[in-house]
Image (spheres, grey):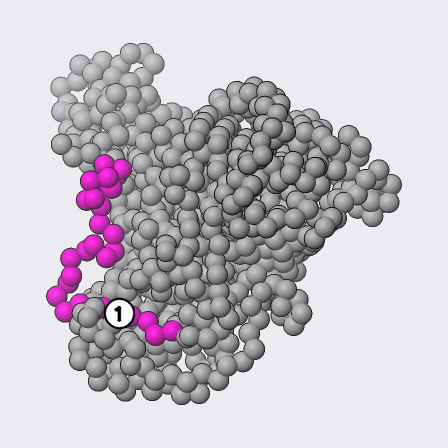
């Protein structure tokens, strides 16, 4: 028995990823020669020995591209370095060989001489050398100056959050296959098949209709394959196009970690004004994102960071600004949350500090500052925050997590223990759903209904393990009233769905699910009209064959509404009904189309980057999290003891998928705030594999991990009343970071710990109070 639920195939190991596909006859294996230094100029590049190495078929440099520059926003990024080297790991040449052995034998034979130049390797050094990209977005509201002047209390500080590696299980990969007529087929592990199509065509001087990109699935992506998959697709495309042979590029883990960008490190200077009650009256924050050496998606990521500096809290007076540092590291890129977690970290840290300064409980300081329902509900950028579930979530989680009692127990524990120290914290998430670039909020879908009652659906959504296919499958099955197994999501391809956006911004199911449902409705409308004729025909006792009804468009009832599609039957309110199977047959013989295509664009959104105002988001996904940690005072070892998460996902389309996204997103966030640290030596990444880069293990997850959803049927503006889930759980892991800060403050007798992200065990062990550092 086959099941259309992809999870079964994944678990059985039957799902094919790019590297699993059987070798095609004549196929070439590709490898990259990259820069060992972070900054410099190529003085000599001699590839003769590589070319002559046994089994090598071709070697390529930047000169082989028709157009060597690409980029998601600015085309400032060379596929292969020309003369200037901007980061350690930058691709310089591409080698195509008959097999892996020949490839690995040949790669070290390149003779490369680079004159090194001083490198800018951190935000601090970018400030020193004034190395920045041009974009400088701002958001402001109220009158900060006045608010600071008359505030009862102020605090100021700086905050830093570091880079994070995506660590998708499947590394960047593309199989490029030349087709007749000089056309190209690309099988890519990409969140953005349309961009792969465009980037590869531009690179080779092809027209867009000559290139088709297919994405069956990815083994994880997390934003790392939103823009940067295109680079590797272009390299594979080049080799296939130039040699006329299929070519596959699958990065080793070390190459992947070295060559690709990470989550942006952010540096922030902040100043907060607050009342004696702990109400935040004004916040000033200047962000600097480390963009790396090319622009990539940095402006959009910085924008989202600024749009989430408020997080769940109403602040009447705001002054936010941002800059993008240009450094000699890999171009940093999209990563689950897309700058929002970095922005939220700043204000969650401020909340923790206000509580410490006032000697109050930080969870209740936060509740004091939540956005209001009828008042205090305008964000600093002017969007009204509707469907606010925060007070409800707060009341419920404080109770269900037994928060107040546990705070008391923790105080006792910390008074008595000589070896360990505990902490607890609640943090919030209000995550804006929609791409902040309005034009990206569009999608299209193709739905084909077959005569046995099964349905094939094609959209621009790519499945990276997040379950977007299963969600769309569920939506379509419900819409037609058929079993989930009778709906199948087809491989994503630019040949079926055009000009799609990346599956990103948590909006894959929203946009593509909406488009799919619109296509379903078009078909259902025709079937409803036909069914009405069938019911009429039955009543008239006509001798005319049902295969000969002929549905004339001019005889269609303009007022026609959809009939009820349920349990493989179509029925009207009078009790007439017909099975779907019967109706499909009648439709076919009467030449009524059983397939359709639809287009969806997210309504009512707009944002003006210049003024930093507008309503960029269709709605907000919200959640709260409470985490408790225990720290070993002698080793700095941090163990999360318990986490409670309570989220509002509207009317969940598939709760199993949503629980998976919440737990996975939270644990990935946990890695960002605690264990994951990248180590470099003169710009060269040392921690380039799992032996040196620590993503959370089973033992790092909370011993008790409770995830709950509230009931919320009011988000009618989005597909099936649901809310997006992909990114919002990630920043909830800030509750763990804040719990660590809370624990350390007990050790410092209430002094503010000088702690940043990640709070690795080493950082925790070495942490000092701010007053002393
Ligand atoms: N990508 C993008 C994103 O281009 N714009 C966005 O606003 C966004 N947000 C989250 C993740 N990816
Ligand atoms: Mo993204 S960070 O690819 O939604």
Left or right, 768 with reference to 528: right
Magenta run includes residue 12: yes
Direction from residue 371 to residue 651 in the image, left or right: left
Determine crowd level at label 1: few under 14, some 14-19, many 20+ residues with C-alpha closer than 10 A: many
Front residue (pair 192, 311): 311
Residue 412 spot, x, y in % from top left: 61, 25
Q: Name the residue under label 1.
A: 30
Residue 519: x and y in percent read 34, 38
Numbered-mark total: 1
| Whole-percent x, y for residue 718 in the image | 48, 33
Instruction: Identify the residue at horizontal 82%, vertical 42% (top origin).
Output: 147
- Residue 472: % across, % down: 34, 36
Q: Is mark 1 on a helix, strand or loop?
A: strand
Along the horizontal axis of the image, is 320 left or right of 517? Answer: right
Q: Is mark 1 within 8 Å of ligand 2?
A: no
In the image, 755 versus 126, the foreground residue is 755
Question: In the rendered structure, which segment of residues is drawn in magenta?
Answer: 6-34
Name the residue located 34 percent from the left edge and 39 percent from the top edge: 467
Q: Quadrant of the N terminus?
A: top left
Residue at position x 40%, y 26% in the image: 559
Q: With respect to residue 306, does 174 lie above or below?
A: below
Residue at 24 percent across and 27 percent down: it is 483
Q: In this view, does 418 lie above or below 301?
A: above
Q: Is residue 492 above or below residue 629?
A: below
Q: Can residue 599 be found in the magenta stretch?
A: no
Q: Work out whether residue 587 can be spotted.
A: no
Q: Residue furthest top?
A: 574
Quadrant housing residue 591: top left
């Amino acid at each position: 028995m086959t099941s259309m639920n992809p999870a079964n195939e994944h678990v059985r190991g039957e799902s094919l990823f790019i590297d699993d596909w059987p070798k095609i006859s004549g196929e070439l294996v590709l490898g990259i020669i990259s820069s060992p230094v972070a900054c410099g100029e190529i003085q000599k590049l001699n590839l003769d020995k590589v070319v002559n190495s046994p089994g090598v078929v071709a070697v390529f440099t930047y000169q082989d591209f028709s157009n060597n520059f690409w980029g998601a926003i600015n085309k400032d990024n060379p596929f292969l370095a020309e003369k200037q080297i901007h980061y350690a790991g930058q691709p310089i040449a591409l080698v195509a060989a008959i097999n892996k052995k020949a490839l690995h034998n040949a790669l070290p034979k390149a003779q490369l001489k680079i004159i090194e130049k001083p490198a800018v390797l951190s935000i601090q050094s970018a400030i020193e050398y004034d190395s920045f990209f041009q974009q400088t977005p701002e958001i402001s509201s109220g009158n900060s100056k006045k608010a600071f002047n008359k505030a009862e209390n102020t605090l100021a500080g700086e905050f830093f959050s570091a880079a994070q590696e995506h660590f998708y299980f499947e590394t960047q990969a593309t199989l490029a296959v030349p087709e007749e007529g000089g056309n190209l087929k690309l099988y890519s592990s990409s969140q953005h098949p349309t961009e792969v199509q465009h980037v590869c065509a531009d690179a080779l001087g092809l027209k867009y209709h000559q290139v088709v990109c297919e994405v069956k699935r990815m083994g994880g992506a997390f934003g790392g394959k939103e823009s940067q998959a295109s680079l590797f697709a272009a390299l594979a495309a080049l080799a296939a196009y130039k040699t006329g042979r299929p070519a596959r590029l699958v990065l080793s883990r070390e190459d992947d970690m070295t060559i690709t960008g990470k989550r942006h490190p952010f540096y922030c200077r902040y100043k907060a004004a607050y009342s004696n009650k702990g109400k935040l009256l004004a916040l000033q924050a200047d962000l600097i994102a480390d963009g790396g050496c090319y622009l990539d998606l940095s402006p959009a990521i910085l924008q989202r960071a600024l749009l989430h500096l408020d997080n769940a809290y109403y602040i009447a007076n705001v002054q936010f600004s941002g800059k993008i540092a240009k450094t000699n590291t890999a171009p940093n890129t999209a990563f689950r949350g897309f700058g929002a977690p970095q922005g939220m970290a700043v204000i969650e840290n401020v909340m923790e500090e206000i509580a410490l300064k006032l000697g109050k409980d930080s969870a209740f300081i936060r509740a004091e500052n939540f956005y209001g329902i009828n008042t205090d509900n305008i964000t600093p950028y002017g969007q009204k925050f509707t469907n606010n579930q925060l007070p409800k979530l707060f009341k419920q989680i404080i109770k269900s997590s037994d928060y107040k009692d546990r705070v008391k127990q923790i105080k006792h524990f910390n008074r008595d223990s000589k070896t360990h120290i505990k902490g607890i914290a609640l943090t919030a998430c209000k995550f804006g759903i929609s791409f902040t670039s309005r034009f990206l909020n569009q999608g299209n879908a193709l739905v084909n209904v077959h005569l046995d009652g099964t349905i094939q659906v094609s959209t621009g959504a790519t499945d990276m393990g997040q379950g977007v296919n299963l969600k769309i499958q569920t939506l379509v099955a419900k819409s037609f009233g058929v079993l989930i197994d009778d709906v199948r999501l087809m491989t994503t391809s630019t040949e079926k769905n055009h000009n799609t956006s990346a599956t990103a911004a948590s909006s894959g199911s929203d946009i593509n699910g909406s488009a799919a449902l619109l296509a379903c409705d078009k078909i259902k409308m025709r079937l409803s009209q036909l069914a009405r004729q069938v019911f009429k025909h039955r009543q008239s006792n006509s001798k005319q064959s049902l295969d000969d009804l002929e549905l004339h468009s001019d005889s269609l009832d303009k007022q026609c509404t959809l009939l009820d599609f349920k349990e493989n039957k179509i029925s009207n309110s009078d009790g007439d009904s017909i099975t779907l199977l019967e109706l499909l047959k009648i439709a076919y013989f009467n030449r009524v189309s059983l397939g359709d295509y639809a287009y969806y664009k997210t309504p009512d959104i707009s944002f003006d980057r210049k003024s930093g105002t507008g309503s960029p988001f269709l709605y907000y996904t919200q959640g709260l999290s409470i985490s408790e940690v225990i720290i070993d005072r002698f080793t700095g070892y941090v163990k999360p003891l318990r986490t409670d998460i309570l989220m509002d996902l509207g009317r969940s389309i598939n709760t199993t998928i949503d629980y998976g996204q919440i737990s996975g997103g939270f644990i990935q966030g946990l890695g960002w705030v605690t264990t994951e640290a990248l180590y470099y030596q003169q710009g060269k990444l040392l921690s380039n594999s799992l032996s040196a880069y620590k993503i959370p293990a089973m033992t790092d997850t909370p011993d008790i991990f409770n995830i709950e959803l509230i009931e919320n049927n009011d988000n009618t503006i989005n597909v099936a009343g649901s809310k997006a889930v992909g990114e919002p759980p990630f920043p909830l892991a800030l509750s763990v970071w804040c719990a660590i800060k809370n624990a350390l403050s007990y050790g410092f007798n209430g002094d503010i710990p000088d702690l940043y992200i990640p709070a690795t065990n080493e950082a925790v062990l070495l942490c000092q109070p701010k007053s002393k550092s």
